[in-house]
Image (tube, rainbow, N blue to C red):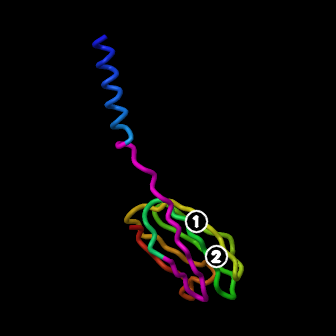
């Protein structure tokens, strides 16, 4: 009987500790991206973790959105004027990422950031 009570007490103590030891899932960050002729603007600097880029083409030309860094190399399809696209990625803290529009990078449509 004493062994059973000791085991029950040990299990209860472990159950009380377990929720505190389990890390809460990190919230997904949404970053609004506006593409104009010939500029890329982010609503905020992205944090490390899961990030959803919501890209809006606010220009009269077709653009794409490309992201590279930390082992990632992702892109959207071409985005028509007035349309949107979504790109979901997992960013690493301290890594420098490059953003650009392939057809217009030579016109200055590029940016960089470091995931904080």
**Residue 64 image label:** 2
The answer to whether 26 appears left or right of 2 in the picture is right
Question: Is the residue under label 1 in contact with that under label 2 (CB below 8 Å)?
Answer: no
Image quadrant holding the C terminus, namely: bottom left
Pick whichever, 46 or 106, lies toward us: 46
> Which residue range is magenta in the image?
20-43
Depicted 8 relative to depicted 39: above or below: above
* Quarter of the figure with residue 82: bottom right
Write down the residue under mark 1: 74
Depicted 84 relative to depicted 27: above or below: below
Q: Where is residue 26 in the image (x, y as percent from the top left)?
A: 45, 56
Label 1: element kind: strand
Task: Report how far apart the C-alphas of labels 2 and 1 lie in the structure.
Answer: 11 Å
The residue lying at 31 percent from left, 25 percent from top is 10
Q: Residue furthest right?
A: 80
* Quarter of the figure with residue 65: bottom right
């Amino acid at each position: 009987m004493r062994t059973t009570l000791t085991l029950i007490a040990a299990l209860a103590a472990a159950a009380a500790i377990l929720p505190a030891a389990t890390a809460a899932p990190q919230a997904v960050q949404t970053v609004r991206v506006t593409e104009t002729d010939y500029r890329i603007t982010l609503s905020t600097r992205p944090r490390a973790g899961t990030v959803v880029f919501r890209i809006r083409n606010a220009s009269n030309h077709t653009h794409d959105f490309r992201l590279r860094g930390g082992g990632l190399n992702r892109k959207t399809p071409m985005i028509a004027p007035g349309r949107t696209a979504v790109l979901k990625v997992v960013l690493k803290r301290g890594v420098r990422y490059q953003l650009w529009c392939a057809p217009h990078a030579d016109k200055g449509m590029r940016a960089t950031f470091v995931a904080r």
